């Protein structure tokens, strides 16, 4: 049996949130939603003995950065523009990330929806290994 957990920026945990509620969080969140406490949302998917995680980090100016990890501790980062990986911005309190990792909201939603449904990374966006971030960039 699979289970989806959403940990909101406030730290509140929601078990098996509706896809519509997650979609609203991404595409049209309430004012100030992302600036409550940690400024990040985490989705965790449990399927029997495996656990997968998708961190969602927004930037008003740049879009949404996704960080996927699985039970094997493999990590994958969303990629929008390889040419902007050395340009770094703060996306959450004291969390600095390369601008090239941020996706437009609608594109991020496609990846988030796939994760919510299956726990997997979508093939609809490009993912990179953190080792691919050049010197001067940040994940």
Image: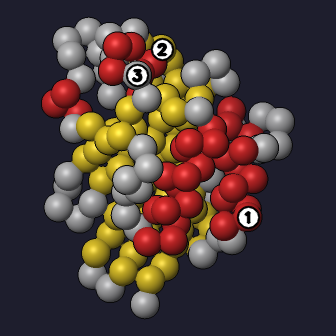
| Left or right of residue 117, residue 46 in this image | left
Q: Which residue is mark 3?
A: 81
At label 2, counting other C-alpha atoms closer than 10 Å, the crowd grade (few under 14, some 14-19, many 20 or more) is some
**Viewer-nearest of discs 2 and 1:** 1
Up-down: is 79 above or below 60? below
Q: Of the residues under marks 2 and 1, which one precedes in the sequence?
A: 1
**Where, quadrant-wise, is the N terminus in this rendering?**
bottom left
Residue at image coords 51%, 71% = 117
Q: Of the residues under marks 1 and 3, which one precedes in the sequence?
A: 1
Q: Secondary structure at mark 2?
A: strand
At label 3, counting other C-alpha atoms closer than 10 Å, the crowd grade (few under 14, some 14-19, many 20 or more) is some
Q: Nearer the viewer, residue 6 or 128?
A: 128
Find residue 68 and report its horizontal and vertical position in percent: 35, 50
Using the rendered view, name the quadrant where residue 95 is placed: top left
Using the rendered view, name the quadrant where residue 37 is placed: top right
Find residue 54 and report its horizontal and vertical position in percent: 43, 53
Residue at image coords 28%, 75% = 50
**Viewer-nearest of discs 3 and 2:** 3
Instruction: Name, please, the residue furthest toward the right.
Output: 31
Q: Nearer the viewer, residue 23 or 81?
A: 81
At label 1, counting other C-alpha atoms closer than 10 Å, the crowd grade (few under 14, some 14-19, many 20 or more) is few
Q: Which residue is mark 2?
A: 89
| Left or right of residue 50, residue 66 in this image | right
**Where, quadrant-wise, is the C terminus in this rendering?**
top left
Q: Which residue is mark 1?
A: 20
Q: Of the residues under marks 3 and 2, which one precedes in the sequence?
A: 3
Up-down: is 7 above or below 92? below
């Amino acid at each position: 049996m699979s289970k989806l957990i959403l940990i909101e920026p406030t730290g509140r945990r929601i078990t098996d949130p509706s896809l519509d509620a997650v979609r609203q969080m991404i595409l049209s969140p309430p004012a100030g939603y992302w600036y409550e406490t940690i400024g990040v949302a985490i989705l965790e998917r449990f399927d029997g003995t495996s656990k997968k995680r998708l961190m969602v980090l927004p930037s008003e100016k740049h879009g949404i950065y996704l960080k996927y990890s699985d039970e094997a501790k493999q990590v994958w980062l969303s990629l929008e523009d390889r040419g902007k990986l050395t340009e770094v911005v703060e996306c959450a309190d004291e969390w600095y990330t390369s601008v090239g990792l941020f996706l437009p909201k609608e594109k991020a939603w496609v990846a988030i929806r796939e994760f919510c449904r299956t726990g997997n990374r979508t093939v609809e966006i490009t993912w990179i290994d953190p080792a691919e971030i050049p010197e001067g960039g940040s994940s």
